[in-house]
Image (spheres, rainbow, N blue to C red):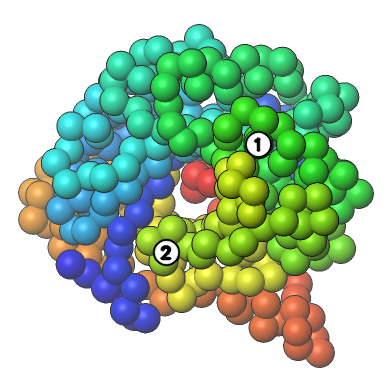
Amino acid sequence: MPQDVFARPLKDLRISVTDRCNFRCTYCMPFDEYPWIPNNELLRYDEVGRLARLLVGLGVDEIRLTGGEPLIRPHLEDLIRRLSSIPGMDDLSLTTNGSLLAEKVASLRAAGLQRVNVSLDTLNPEKFRQIRRRGDLAKVLDGLFAAKDHGLHPIKLNAVIQRGVNDDDIVPLVEFARQHGFTIRFIEFMDVGNANGWVLDRVVSKREILDGINRVHPLREIGRNGGRAPAVDYEFVDGAGQVGVIASVTEPFCASCTRLRLTADGKLVTCLFAGQGHDLKTPLRRGDSDDELVSRVAAIWGGRHDRYSEERLAALRSPTGYDAAGRHKIEMITLGG
Ligand code: SAM
Ligand code: SF4
Ligand code: SF4
């Protein structure tokens, strides 16, 4: 089982199935047009399935499908069927903006999808339009409840919090999650890519998020699931569920980062803030054997020394500060959030 330069094992795989999206969230994909990956450059589902099987053989036990918006890729259930039948995989999940979930959840469930994460940053329809810039809150909520009706569990809500934008939505989102049995995870606004205009002033820290919730519903810390999850989990003292916080900016967790990303055009990316990936599609399509592909992946992981969020925090605390625009980073839609 390969370990990277800091002895971190490879355990989690995020697969981006498309870089396209039907939303244009200000914190992720603010522009209308991007240099999209051409369709013939996308990995086919049989290719993704083969790579996933090889990666499970190397130690991956959790796979999450993402994008872009994964549900706009046609016939995603075919990929889910392939992935859910790989022996040795403990967990298969999907992160979605929820807009197409109501119409697709039955086939996703039947294909073997176990659970879903739905992005939901506000319950206010006007603010939803301001943040996400396309789509409709009512359709997202329909998708959420359809997932619940179809027995997906747990259903996690992801909320990116920005100061002056939706910091006043934290408590209403918590109430909504408690009422309906969803787990909610708050995500500090991150400087992924170079397009989202990230500034530190707009980051609402984990401490502030927890303080706001604690004032209304006291929390008790549980910790990181499996010791390696990005979120630190908390349970409500009154027993009414859980909250998680992903604090990439103020409390980086690079030391326990076991995640590898596969882009929709077949590049392996070893960090969310990486500037480039490692091409796997060329060796795959020229006919490399399983052993050759496995050696290539093991070598990429073995050379991994990413700790971007720890370096960012050190820079933020230094006299020179941190220049978010100073380094080219792959956009979130391309590498898969
Ligand atoms: N389109 C799907 C969705 O929105 O859930 C999946 C892809 S999206 C890139 C994956 C996750 O990244 C979402 O939960 C989104 O909220 C989060 N995300 C995007 N940009 C972010 C940013 N700048 N900071 C923190 N989280 C971000
Ligand atoms: Fe699309 Fe998800 Fe990015 Fe929003 S966060 S623009 S829904 S990929
Ligand atoms: Fe992992 Fe990179 Fe995020 Fe650190 S910054 S936790 S290495 S993805």
In the image, residue 332 lies at what x, y percent? 58, 47
Asked if residue 1 lies left or right of residue 108, the reply is left
Asked whether disc 2 touches disc 1, contact meaning CB atoms under 8 Å apart, the reply is: no
Identity, as a three-letter code, of the amino acid under mark 1: Arg
Q: What is the secondary structure assignment of the residue under circle 2?
A: loop
Which residue is depicted at the point 49% across and 21% down?
A: 147
Which class describes the residues within 10 Å of circle 2: few (<14), some (14-19), or many (20+)?
some
Farthest residue toward the right? 164
**Res. 113 visible in picture:** yes
* Residue 36 to residue 195: above or below: above
Identity, as a three-letter code, of the amino acid under mark 2: Arg
Residues 206 and 248: in front is 206
Pair 2/1: label in front: 1
* Residue 39 to residue 58: above or below: above
What residue is shown with label 2? 228
In the image, residue 220 lies at what x, y percent? 62, 61
| Image quarter of residue 82 | top left
